[in-house]
Amino acid sequence: MSLPTPDFLDEDTARAEICRVGQSLFARGYVHATAGNISVRLADGYLITPTDACLGTLQPERLARLDAEGRQLSGDRASKTIALHRHIYAATAEAGEPARCVIHTHSTQLVACSLAADSAAGGRLVDDAELLPPITPYFVMKVGRVPHIAYHRPGDPAAAEAVARAIARHAAQGRHLKAVMLARLGPNVWHGSPAEAMAVLEELEETARLHRLLPDAAPLTEAQIEELRQTFGASW
């Protein structure tokens, strides 16, 4: 079941929401220091947090404003991850469920899961690797599958291309992704607004915490997952 295409936020609302969500994530330990970034797709361009900005102390007027081609128009210098975010916006639009906000963090439990999985794979994750098994119904319903993208240095264009391929690959199988995990770095999550994207991140980080507490917990059965598909439109 596909959701309606989300409306674009007006720029003032988007600026306020980026700052509100950034402060909330920082206060609760989802991000630290100057790690992480948030962007919003506007009708005629993008807003993104500045490079090396602390998400806990963002100022609306200092957010980087970019045009539809990614060229900066105003504000502080844009985070280098705008290239990855733009790939996500384009790939999700092509898949038929366009994102309007992307959040990237270095959330502790998720990075710990990634370190363990990447180490076990000898640093050679395959394209179809997934970060977490379907251990709770709300993970299946609210997040869905999370491809584990092989390690690339921060800002490497190859990572953006790998994320776009993962979105397209899952869309071809009838699944709409809401998150990917960049190995040893952190998650990128997306949705129709900053508040909705933050909710995806919260559920994802909590699932990672549960997985680390009980790594041998049995996943939901295929019959149980199918029930979630039929009842709630879960994309798994």
Image (tube, rainbow, N blue to C red):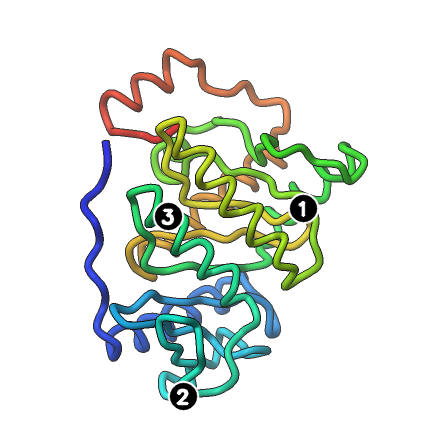
Q: Residue at x 37, y 16 (%)?
A: 224
**Residue 233's x, y, as percent?**
26, 29
Work out which residue is located at the far top of the displayed protein and give it. 223
> Which quadrant of the figure has residue 65?
bottom left
Amino acid found under the numbered disc labelled 2: Ser
**Residue 116's x, y, as percent?**
72, 39
Asked if residue 203 is positioned above or below residue 190 in the image, the reply reads above
- Crowding at dot 3, Cα within 10 Å, few <14 / some 14-19 / many 20+, comes out as many
Nearer the observer, 19 or 66: 66
Q: Residue at x 53, y 47 (%)?
A: 163
Q: Which is more foreground, mark 1 or mark 2? A: 2
Q: Earlier in the sequence, mark 1 or mark 2?
A: 2
Amino acid found under the numbered disc labelled 3: Thr
Secondary structure state at the residue bearing disc 3: helix
Q: Which residue is mark 2?
A: 74
Q: Quadrant of the image for the N terminus?
A: top left
Q: Residue at x 37, y 54 (%)?
A: 197
Asked if residue 21 is positioned above or below residue 235 in the image, the reply reads below
Q: Which residue is mark 3?
A: 92
